[in-house]
Protein backbone atom coordinates (compact mmCIF):
# COMPACT_ATOMS: atom_id res chain seq x y z
CA UNK A 1 0.00 0.00 0.00
CA UNK A 2 1.12 3.55 -0.61
CA UNK A 3 -1.19 5.65 1.56
CA UNK A 4 -1.00 5.83 5.33
CA UNK A 5 -2.50 8.20 7.88
CA UNK A 6 -0.99 9.22 11.20
CA UNK A 7 -3.27 10.07 14.10
CA UNK A 8 -1.35 12.82 15.86
CA UNK A 9 -3.09 12.57 19.25
CA UNK A 10 -2.72 8.78 19.63
CA UNK A 11 0.54 8.60 17.64
CA UNK A 12 -0.78 5.65 15.64
CA UNK A 13 -0.13 4.90 11.95
CA UNK A 14 -2.84 3.21 9.88
CA UNK A 15 -2.87 1.96 6.32
CA UNK A 16 -5.63 3.58 4.28
CA UNK A 17 -7.52 1.10 2.16
CA UNK A 18 -8.87 2.58 -1.07
CA UNK A 19 -11.77 0.56 -2.46
CA UNK A 20 -12.12 2.35 -5.79
CA UNK A 21 -9.89 1.36 -8.73
CA UNK A 22 -9.22 5.01 -9.65
CA UNK A 23 -5.91 6.07 -8.12
CA UNK A 24 -2.55 7.54 -9.19
CA UNK A 25 0.17 5.25 -10.48
CA UNK A 26 2.94 4.47 -8.02
CA UNK A 27 5.50 7.29 -7.92
CA UNK A 28 8.33 8.93 -6.06
CA UNK A 29 9.83 12.42 -5.94
CA UNK A 30 6.38 14.04 -6.28
CA UNK A 31 4.90 16.92 -4.31
CA UNK A 32 1.86 17.09 -2.06
CA UNK A 33 0.00 19.83 -0.25
CA UNK A 34 -3.00 19.71 2.10
CA UNK A 35 -6.10 21.88 1.74
CA UNK A 36 -9.43 21.62 3.58
CA UNK A 37 -9.59 17.88 4.14
CA UNK A 38 -7.87 17.06 0.86
CA UNK A 39 -4.36 16.33 -0.34
CA UNK A 40 -3.22 17.39 -3.79
CA UNK A 41 -0.41 15.38 -5.40
CA UNK A 42 1.47 16.63 -8.45
CA UNK A 43 4.01 15.01 -10.78
CA UNK A 44 6.92 12.84 -9.76
CA UNK A 45 8.52 9.82 -11.34
CA UNK A 46 6.47 6.69 -11.97
CA UNK A 47 9.30 4.38 -13.02
CA UNK A 48 9.24 2.42 -16.28
CA UNK A 49 5.44 1.99 -16.11
CA UNK A 50 4.49 5.68 -15.92
CA UNK A 51 7.68 7.69 -16.59
CA UNK A 52 8.03 11.36 -15.66
CA UNK A 53 4.67 12.79 -14.61
CA UNK A 54 2.81 16.10 -14.64
CA UNK A 55 -0.58 14.85 -13.53
CA UNK A 56 -2.53 16.17 -10.60
CA UNK A 57 -4.59 14.16 -8.15
CA UNK A 58 -6.78 15.07 -5.19
CA UNK A 59 -7.19 12.63 -2.32
CA UNK A 60 -10.41 13.27 -0.40
CA UNK A 61 -9.87 12.22 3.24
CA UNK A 62 -13.60 11.57 3.48
CA UNK A 63 -14.78 9.44 1.64
CA UNK A 64 -11.24 8.01 1.10
CA UNK A 65 -11.32 8.57 -2.65
CA UNK A 66 -8.86 9.71 -5.35
CA UNK A 67 -9.85 12.12 -8.12
CA UNK A 68 -7.80 12.89 -11.25
CA UNK A 69 -7.67 16.65 -11.80
CA UNK A 70 -8.60 18.02 -15.18
CA UNK A 71 -6.12 20.91 -15.26
CA UNK A 72 -6.14 23.76 -17.78
CA UNK A 73 -3.85 26.68 -18.55
CA UNK A 74 -0.08 26.33 -18.74
CA UNK A 75 0.36 23.00 -16.93
CA UNK A 76 3.96 22.53 -15.73
CA UNK A 77 6.05 20.12 -17.77
CA UNK A 78 6.58 16.60 -16.36
CA UNK A 79 9.03 16.70 -13.45
CA UNK A 80 10.22 15.19 -10.22
CA UNK A 81 12.04 16.51 -7.15
CA UNK A 82 10.19 19.85 -7.22
CA UNK A 83 8.74 21.85 -4.34
CA UNK A 84 5.24 23.16 -3.74
CA UNK A 85 3.72 25.49 -1.16
CA UNK A 86 0.15 26.42 -0.41
CA UNK A 87 -0.34 30.17 -0.54
CA UNK A 88 -3.52 31.79 0.75
CA UNK A 89 -6.81 29.98 0.54
CA UNK A 90 -6.72 28.56 -2.97
CA UNK A 91 -3.27 28.70 -4.57
CA UNK A 92 -0.35 26.34 -4.77
CA UNK A 93 3.05 27.49 -6.01
CA UNK A 94 5.41 25.03 -7.71
CA UNK A 95 9.13 25.65 -8.12
CA UNK A 96 12.02 23.81 -9.74
CA UNK A 97 12.46 20.11 -10.18
CA UNK A 98 14.21 17.80 -12.60
CA UNK A 99 12.75 16.76 -15.98
CA UNK A 100 15.11 13.84 -16.64
CA UNK A 101 17.61 16.01 -18.52
CA UNK A 102 18.00 19.27 -16.63
CA UNK A 103 17.26 21.02 -13.37
CA UNK A 104 14.39 23.49 -13.71
CA UNK A 105 13.99 26.97 -12.20
Image (cartoon, rainbow, N blue to C red):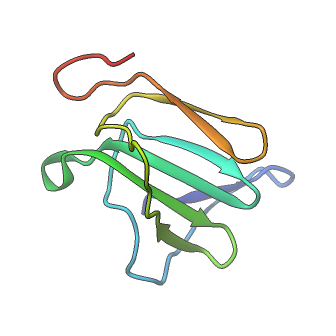
User: Which of these two is toward me, 47 or 84?
Assistant: 84
Residue 30, by quadrant, is top left
Q: Give residue 10's position: percent from left, percent from top.
A: 83, 55
Q: Give residue 45's position: percent from left, percent from top.
A: 28, 42
Quadrant of the image containing the N terminus: bottom left
Left or right position of 53 against 33: left
Residue 62 against residue 52 in the figure, above or below: below
User: Which of these two is toward me, 1 or 65?
Assistant: 65
Residue lying furthest right:
9
Q: Residue at x 38, y 81 (%)?
A: 21
Residue 53 against residue 56 in the figure, above or below: above
User: Which of these two is toward me, 74 or 48?
Assistant: 74
Q: Residue at x 32, y 56 (%)?
A: 26
Left or right position of 34 against 95: right
Q: Give residue 27's position: percent from left, percent from top.
A: 33, 48
Residue 48 against residue 38 in the figure, above or below: above
Residue 72 against residue 51 in the figure, above or below: below
Residue lying furthest front:
73
Quadrant of the image containing the C terminus: top left
Q: How many marks?
A: 0
Residue lying furthest left:
48
Q: Residue at x 29, y 24 (%)?
A: 98
Q: Give residue 6's position: percent from left, percent from top.
A: 69, 53
Q: Residue at x 22, y 17 (%)?
A: 102
Left or right position of 62 against 45: right
Amino acid sequence: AALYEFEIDSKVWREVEIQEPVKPCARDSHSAVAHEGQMMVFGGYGGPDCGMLNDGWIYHVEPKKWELLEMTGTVPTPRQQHSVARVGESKMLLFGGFDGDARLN
